């Protein structure tokens, strides 16, 4: 599984949680917070992504990610 594949999964779940972003052209540099995701939304997006990938990674390890690209990189490194 590539970082790009993980990025696409994060984007898919972000669109599920925040339907207003359906037409947004996501970039790895996009911040979930800047896109309007509150802390519960961000946790849901991450948990949904980990469930899709069948991974068990503590959420605290994702806290240092500044954007979606970094989040995908962290998940990829732990997979």
Image (spheres, rainbow, N blue to C red):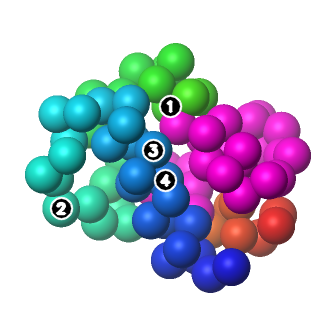
Numbered label attached to residue 42: 1
Q: Nearer the viewer, mark 4 or mark 1?
A: 4
Instruction: Assign the C terminus to one quadrant of the image.
Output: bottom right
Question: Label 3 vs label 4: CA separation?
Answer: 5 Å
Residue 44, relative to residue 32: is it above or below?
A: above
- Provide the residue designation for mark 4: 10
Instruction: Assign the N terminus to one quadrant of the image.
Output: bottom right
Question: Label 3 vs label 1: CA separation?
Answer: 10 Å
- Compared across the picture, whether 52 is left or right of 33 comes to right
Label 3 with label 4: CB-CB less than 8 Å: yes
Question: Label 3 vs label 2: CA separation?
Answer: 14 Å
Numbered label attached to residue 25: 2
- Provide the residue designation for mark 3: 13
State which region is magenta: 45-72
Q: Earlier in the sequence, mark 3 or mark 2?
A: 3
Numbered label attached to residue 60: none
Q: Front-most of 70 and 4?
A: 4
Question: Label 1 vs label 2: CA separation?
Answer: 18 Å
Label 1 sits on a secondary structure element that is helix
Residue at left 72%, top 58%? 53
């Amino acid at each position: 599984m590539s970082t790009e594949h993980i990025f696409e999964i994060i984007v898919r779940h972000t669109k599920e949680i925040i339907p207003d972003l359906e037409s947004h052209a996501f970039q790895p540099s996009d911040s979930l917070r800047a896109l309007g995701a509150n802390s519960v939304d961000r946790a849901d997006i991450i948990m949904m992504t980990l469930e899709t990938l069948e991974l068990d990674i503590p959420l605290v390890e994702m806290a240092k990610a500044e954007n979606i690209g970094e989040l995908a990189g962290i998940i990829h490194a732990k997979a």
